Image (cartoon, rainbow, N blue to C red):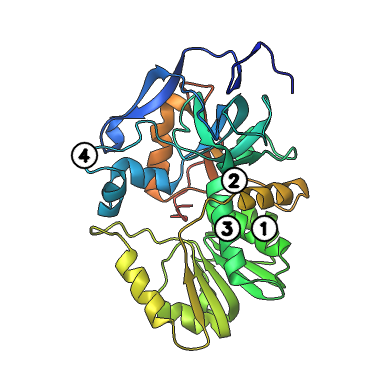
Amino acid sequence: MQCRHYEETRDTVKQTTPNFMTAVVQGAYGLDALALSERPVPSAGPGQIRIKVTASSVNPMDWHLATGTSGIVRLVEGFRRPKHEIPGREASGVVDQIGAGVTEFELGQPVFGWLTGAFAEYAIAEADHMWIAPAAMTGFECAALPIAGGAALEAVELGDVEGKRVVVNGASGGVGHYAVQIAKARGASWVAGVSSSGNAELVRSLGADQVIAYDSEDFTSERWDVVIDCIGNRSGSDIRRALAGDGTWVVVGDHNNDGLVGPLPRLVARLARWRFGSRSCHWFVQGEEVRHLQELAALAETGSIRSHVSDVVALGDVRVGYDRIESGRSVGKLLVDTEATHDVQLLTDERDEAEVRS
């Protein structure tokens, strides 16, 4: 990729950019506080890179941070208003400026990863939270990977799926649709995906050996070595009944927003109850490790994973994405086009079934 109009300083090599950018800003909690505005283009500091954002993605994490529903969010992000004015936690784009001490990236290089302030034309990222985008994917497909793909990769690793029968509950959601593909790539002997009957064809196209339609079947009536649970809508006793003698339950998320600390008390109690016996339960907070991005890029390059993009919204219409997450009717990933300010491009029909909040 060719880049033009470079100028060098002592610390940074940068491409000439405008002084101001369009961004989504939020000065208070609540979705009604989301607004499109103009902000100064930030500069990369030591250990950082600036990217010209191609696309970002709306995730359940963004909804929690925007609404401040759970008290734990306000403890971390601020009681009265979000700590970070510009929302968005993952993106793909092109390296536009390189901070001092960064040697692993070049100007004009396509990258993807985790950052803060992704719902804008330009964003700053820590260099160790980004990686080179796989050539096998478009910039939009890459933007969907870091959060959901990273969580799916960790879940599959915790399940140690090689040679095992695996079921993914919520297989058509953001995390779930990657988990099906990664479990297959990691050598699971049989992978089943649980989804609505309306999304069965999508799950089958991801490589699932079996599709279980939750509106007519119950995945806990069969025996599994590993349950990757992206929804958390079944009780521990249901899952215990479905697991083989030394089976593993990997809980990717829990969407209970009640109380000061949200789902934490229930999750801690669940882990304590599962400490005894041959079956195990794992719950994790996603780590942002560059090795996960590297592994996801490698899987994409070999054709082992792909991103299912259900919808694309313009930067100025990002509220539509939040509303879709809140409804629980998200299938695959919903992306934000940072180069468009308005007009929504819905790629799929609205669905009535409540799918996983990826």
Q: Label 3 belongs to which residue?
A: 152
Camera-side mark, 2 or 1:
2
Residue 181's tag is 1
From this viewpoint, which residue is outermost toward the left? 80
Q: Mark 4 or 3 closer to N-term?
A: 4
The amino acid beneath tag 4 is Arg
Q: Mark 1 or 3 closer to N-term?
A: 3
The amino acid beneath tag 2 is Leu
Q: Quadrant of residue 52?
A: top right
The amino acid beneath tag 1 is Gln
Q: Nearer the viewer, residue 113 or 336?
A: 113
Contact between marks 1 and 3 (CB within 8 A): the answer is no
Q: Nearer the viewer, residue 134 or 46?
A: 46
x and y, in percent, of residue 73 in the image: 30, 49
The amino acid beneath tag 3 is Ala
Residue 80's tag is 4
Secondary structure state at the residue bearing disc 4: loop
Q: Mark 3 or 2 closer to N-term?
A: 2
